[in-house]
Amino acid sequence: MQETVSRPSNVITFGRHTGEAVQPFSEFSTAVSLEANIVREVGSILIQNAETSHSLFGVKASMISEILALVDECEEENWDGEGAKAIDDRVAGRAVSLIRALPAGVRMPEIAPEVDGRISLDWILTQHSFFSISVGPSNRLPFAWVDGSESGHGVARFDGSKMPLRICFGIQSIINRGYTTLRAA
Amino acid sequence: MAKPAALTPNPNPEHKNSSVFRIGDDRPRLLQTFRETTTSDRSLKAVVFFSAAQVRATGLEVEASEPPPAHANIEKWPWLDDPDVQKARQMELAGRIVSGATVWRVDAGES
């Protein structure tokens, strides 16, 4: 638990330091030599990359904070007054790992507690089109999707660092369908 | 929209179902029912409306379970040997029900 709390701020701090270290190379545009121009361009690229990863991880850090807040809210048995199981640190850790493993560019899910002590991650495009994962203490991830009149479910294995392909495809197919609809409109 | 997790059943052997009320869109009565029946100090955040027909279309059943008045349970959820496959199947069924549901966000004052 302690580790998951400290990680986000560590990474943000790292991103900021990276920016400071390369900032002088990019801001100064008075150099005239070819080498200076190359250094300047490389500096700009480094800053751009640092800012991109900072903003990407900023979104993930915010999502991880939401998960930790949810766990705080549901850390005791019977949090719903109807016998719900507490969400424990193993489940929280798995959910955080899953968020970290999301490929760049995939939007963040909505989260919800489940009465059996799991955390639900939902990618909702519309009321009739969404993809849900249920994160529990094991390395197996039940998932289900609804897309109009079609629906399905499955279980994928998550090693803690690499997002299962079946889940990646599932999320992307729901989200990309939304893009296609928007582009056609 | 509502999330499937709002409807997936409580796996506690005493329950193995989802608890609902057959009240319809009568908001004052819904709020009163919540106040009278809740055993938690959590506030009511949202109410999901769906018909019994939507539940039955998935192969599940809505069965009266009073008291309290108008209380019912969604029954006949799949219980399988593999708990993860069982969970995935339950999520799909819950997802199909919520895809036809409407939501009243009580905490946001939405109507």
Image: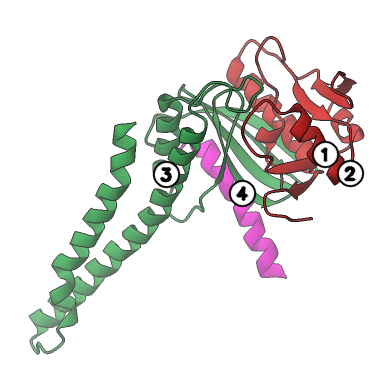
Structural crowding at the residue carrying mark 4, measured as other residues with C-alpha within 10 Å and reported as few (<14), some (14–19) or many (≥20): some
- Chain B in the picture: what colour? red
Q: Secondary structure at mark 2?
A: loop
* Residue B30, numbered circle: 1
Q: Which quarter of the rendering shows the N terminus of chain A?
A: top left
Instruction: Check disc 3 and report the residue beneath it.
Output: A64
- Residue A158, image x, y percentages: 45, 30
> Are the residues under badges 3 and 4 in a single subunit?
yes
Residue at image x 39%, y 36%? A97
Can you identify the residue that label 2 sits on?
B26
Q: To which chain does the residue with label 2 belong?
A: B
What's drawn in magenta, residue-wise? Answer: A163-185
Q: Is residue A116 magenta?
A: no
Q: Secondary structure at mark 3?
A: helix
Chain of the residue under the numbered disc 1 shown in the image = B
- The amino acid on which the numbered mark 1 sits, given as a three-letter code, is Leu
Q: Nearer the viewer, residue B107 or A154?
A: B107
| Residue A88 shows in the view | yes
Three-letter amino acid code at disc 4? Ser
SS at circle 4: helix
